[in-house]
């Protein structure tokens, strides 16, 4: 069996085990057995997912302490750098997802126009897209 690419492997390792099909579960088991550090990284990432879904920031500091000495330490350093923003994202119900979606749509239209994106043309094109 061929090892999947890194992106596919990362997705498989971050999915809940009950969401994996038989083939994917075998791949994850083989990789976990061959590279024990991946098991530690998966446990830390699962703990972060639980922390995000809980809505309580009390577990952020203990998670950071554990994560800083794990294989995902670079991610943990990034979370520590933006500690206040991460705590707010965990505790508050708001999201900027809709804004990001509109920006993505605007940038896609701008790229499709191939440099002809003056404001009037962009406005006309955006209004017809919505």
Image (tube, rainbow, N blue to C red):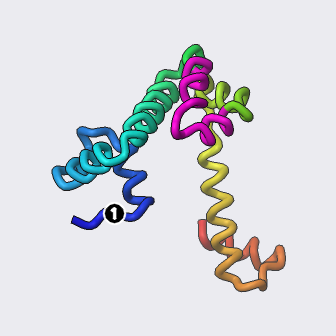
User: How many numbered circles are shown?
Assistant: 1
In the image, 67: left or right of 27? right
Assign a secondary structure to mark 1: loop
- Magenta highlight: main SS: helix
Write down the region rendered in magenta. Answer: 60-79
The answer to which image quadrant residue 37 occupies is top left
Q: Residues within 10 Å of mark 1 (few under 14, many from 20)?
A: few
Q: Position of residue 91 (x, y in %)?
A: 60, 22
Q: Does 75 appear in magenta?
A: yes
- Quickly name the residue at label 1: 4
The residue sitting at the top extreme is: 58
Q: Position of residue 36 (x, y in %)?
A: 37, 40
* Residue sitting nearer the eye, 101 or 17: 17
Q: Residue at x 41, y 32 (%)?
A: 43
**Above or below — where is 60 with respect to 48?**
above
Q: Residue at x 67, y 36 (%)?
A: 77
**Above or below — where is 38 with respect to 48?**
below
The residue sitting at the left extreme is: 22
The answer to which image quadrant residue 67 occupies is top right
Q: Position of residue 106 (x, y in %)?
A: 68, 66
In the image, 93: left or right of 38? right
């Amino acid at each position: 069996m061929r090892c999947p690419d890194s992106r596919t492997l990362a997705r498989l390792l971050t999915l809940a085990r009950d969401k994996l099909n038989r083939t994917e579960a075998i791949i994850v088991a083989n990789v976990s057995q061959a590279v024990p550090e991946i098991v530690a990284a998966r446990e830390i990432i699962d703990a972060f997912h639980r922390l995000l879904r809980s809505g309580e920031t009390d577990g952020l500091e203990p998670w950071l302490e554990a994560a800083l000495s794990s294989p995902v330490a670079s991610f943990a350093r990034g979370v520590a750098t933006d500690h206040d923003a991460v705590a707010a994202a965990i505790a508050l119900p708001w999201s900027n997802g809709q804004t990001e979606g509109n920006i993505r749509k605007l940038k896609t239209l701008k790229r499709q126009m191939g440099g002809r994106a003056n404001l009037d043309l962009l406005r006309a094109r955006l209004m017809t897209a919505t």
